[in-house]
Amino acid sequence: MEESLSGNSKIPVREKTRRNFLVYLVGSSLTSIAIGYIFPKPSQSREVDLETLCSFYPHNSRCQNYLPGVEAQDTNSKAIKVDALLATATPGIPIPVHGLPNDSVDYLIIKDGPQIAEYAISPICTHLGCTVKWNTEKNRFICPCHGSQYDSLGRVVHGPARRSLPLITVVVKQNQVRLVGTKPAIDPR
């Protein structure tokens, strides 16, 4: 029942298993403490803020009365009311709006119905970043720098640009149009 550990010393088998148990116990305790220091417990929860949640999931029950983003304004800096806009808007013709912090002009899309689309077009050319403008005569967005052209949904019609114009999220709620500076979860084009 005795085993030789080194040279002439003899250690009983029972003591060897007890020693192994204590070594594992101390080792695992030290490992747990080290992991606690390396990966500390977060002081705040990892729950998504309401702005992000409602941008990606506008039909979530917590977003029922929440108004995300910023209020869209017309070119005269007046708040846009949905009922007044839809009474005068023509489907297929983008409407310039202000509101996002970068002071850019974005374009609301009016769909048949009429109704406001869940996205707006950011007029930043995907070729070199110039600001495109809506040309009512040609029914297109035209880049003044290199001539790229986009249709009323922001898709490339004529290069050198290869990608469609970027989109931002639009939320229509409580007779307001709200602009959220993130791209929609799904590109509807």
Image (cartoon, grey):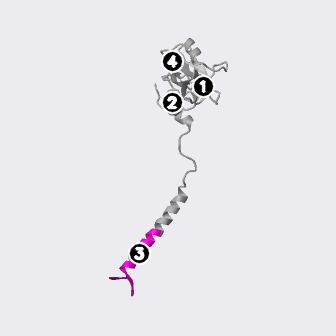
Q: Quadrant of the N terminus?
A: bottom left
Distance, label 3 to label 2, CA atoms, is: 60 Å
Secondary structure beneath dot 2 equals loop
Cβ atoms at labels 4 and 1 below 8 Å apart: no
Give coordinates of residue 162: x percent, y percent. Answer: 49, 28
Residues drawn in magenta:
1-25
Residue 15 visible to the viewer: yes
Is residue 3 inside the magenta stretch? yes
N-terminal label among 3 and 2:
3
Looking at the image, is mark 2 or mark 4 nearer the viewer?
2
For marks 2 and 4, the one nearer the N-term is 2
Q: In this rendering, does residue 132 appear at all?
A: no
The residue tagged 1 is: 131
SS class, disc 4: strand
Reply above or below: 46 against 60: below
Residue named by callout 3: 18
Dot placed on the residue nearer the N-terminal end, 2 or 1: 2
